[in-house]
Amino acid sequence: MTVSALEVAQFLTTSKHELIIDVRAPIEFFKGHIPNAINIPLFEDSERAEIGTLYKQQGKDTAVSRGLEIVSPKMNSFVNQVKALSKNKKVFVYCFRGGMRSNSFAWLMNTSGLDAVIMKGGYKAFRNYVLDYFEQDRKIILLGGKTGSGKTDILKKLNEQNLQIVDLENIAHHKGSAFGTINEQKQNPQQVFEHQLYHQLSELDDSQLVVFEDESQTIGYNKIPIGLWQKMKQATIIKLEIPFELRVQKLVDDYTTVNIEALKSCVIKIAQQLGSLNTKLCLQYLEEQNLSDVARLSLLYYDKAYEFSYKNKKQPIIHLNSDTIDATINAQKVKEMIDTLK
């Protein structure tokens, strides 16, 4: 029985809302996978390592023979798992290169009465497809503003007004500062970040404008892919100017329920930049639960770093003043500015 194979683009299009199975080992899946795929590994990590060693030391035939010994007792379980998960018998399967693992798994599914196809070139081809996708031209506007300006809240309001947005910090699970890990889940590996970013972009209309927050290339330990980053460095920035004390209050509101020890750890991360006296004061203020003064001292550091970063920017920058931190009002101001740019 011949297994049908689809090119990456067709595989991704036809597998939407269908069951996608990654048959690679768990460690491979963890490092990166197609969004919405589930992992049903042909081999566990230790089994994959064993087969790889056999292949190097004793050759392909020995490795394949051992692979069959490992997989044979699992075959019934594989079929039962997939039949329980498949809504309409359609199954989309991939491995690393679109070779033996995905072909064998898809053959088993088809033999069991399911309709399985594989992806040509496997995960490796998908990775190249994604990286090429980030190289595409797109219409981008960046929303800038100093820490505490409420840019994330504004992005959400813009989305409610039918503007296309991509929240990079949400995808990265990081707010992009020393305090960025607070109230966030653990960051994903770089490839997972890139794939989720690709997935969000691919759901948008390429002919229409997309609003991003003005970020540095690195968000926590995730990096914006170089192709997209180069486009962002050329995009117009709408830089929101919010009064200092309003931004202080915004930070206090955001962090008022956060564990004090967690905030202390974040302050210590930027101790060198704050200086010994300001670090000592911040830690003292945290002991006193005086979040306003912690925010003031932190903003002095962040504002200085933020303005320094703008000195090197080459793209157009439009300053937009606001005397409120209200996200709805500021989103309307930003939208009106975007409309004039169109």
Image (cartoon, rainbow, N blue to C red):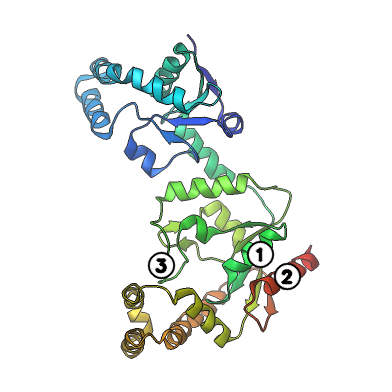
Q: Viewer-proximal residue, 227 or 25? A: 25
Numbered circle sitting on residue 157: 1
Q: Which residue is label 2 attached to?
A: 332
Give the alpha-carbon distance from disc 3 to disc 2, as whole Å: 29 Å
* Label 3 with label 2: CB-CB less than 8 Å: no
Three-letter code for the amino acid on which mark 2 is drawn:
Gln
Q: Which residue is label 3 attached to?
A: 182
Where is residue 225? Give x, y as percent: 51, 53
- The quadrant of the image that shows the C terminus is bottom right
* Label 2 with label 1: CB-CB less than 8 Å: yes
Task: Give the farthest residue toward the left.
Answer: 57
Q: In the rendered structure, which disc, 1 or 3, sits on the residue that comes first in sequence? A: 1
Where is residue 307? Give x, y as percent: 54, 80
Give the alpha-carbon distance from disc 2 to disc 1, as whole Å: 8 Å
Q: Dot 3, crowdedness within 10 Å: few (<14), some or many (≥20)?
A: some
Say whether residue 234 is visible: no
As helix, strand or loop, the secondary structure at mark 3 comes to: loop
Where is residue 194? Give x, y as percent: 49, 49
Task: Give the farthest residue toward the top.
Answer: 1
